[in-house]
Amino acid sequence: MGDSFLAIVGAFLILSGSVLYLIRNVMARFGVDGWAWLPEGNQFKTYEHQLTWSKVAAGIVATTGLVFLGVLLWPR
């Protein structure tokens, strides 16, 4: 893989992770209920639970981007 490809993919994944977190944070904060199909009383319907999992999902994506950039910047 080329160095420019790794840089583009890494930057894209970091940006995607940030946007994923921001979108889920806004959805949880404003009560957009995309989880209506879940049974009542489910923990995932709470703001705190959604915010926690949005951080986890965004962290996975952003960390993958950092790994791509780390591979790019690793001395050879």
Image (cartoon, rainbow, N blue to C red):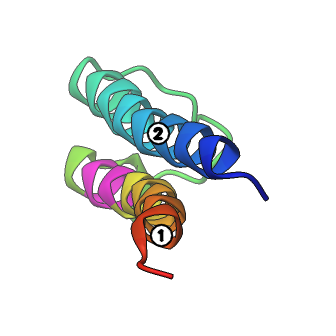
Residue bearing the label numbered 2: 11
Q: Nearer the viewer, residue 66 or 49?
A: 66
Q: Quadrant of residue 39?
A: bottom right
N-terminal of the pair, mark 2 or mark 1, is 2
Where in the figure is residue 17, as x and y percent of width and height? Answer: 43, 43
Q: Nearer the viewer, residue 26 or 39?
A: 26
Query: Residues at badges 2 and 1 in contact (C-beta under 8 Å)?
Result: no
* Marks 2/1: CA–CA distance: 10 Å
Mark 2 Cα shell of 10 Å, populated few (<14), some (14-19), many (≥20): some
Residue at x 38%, y 59% (from the top left corner): 53
The outermost residue toward the right is: 1
Mark 1 Cα shell of 10 Å, populated few (<14), some (14-19), many (≥20): some
Query: Which range of residues does the magenta coloring cover?
Result: 49-55
Is 73 on the left or on the right of 38, as rendered? left
Where in the figure is residue 13, as x and y percent of width and height? Answer: 53, 44
> Residue type at mark 2?
Ala
Residue at x 54%, y 35% (from the top left corner): 12
Q: Quadrant of residue 27?
A: top left
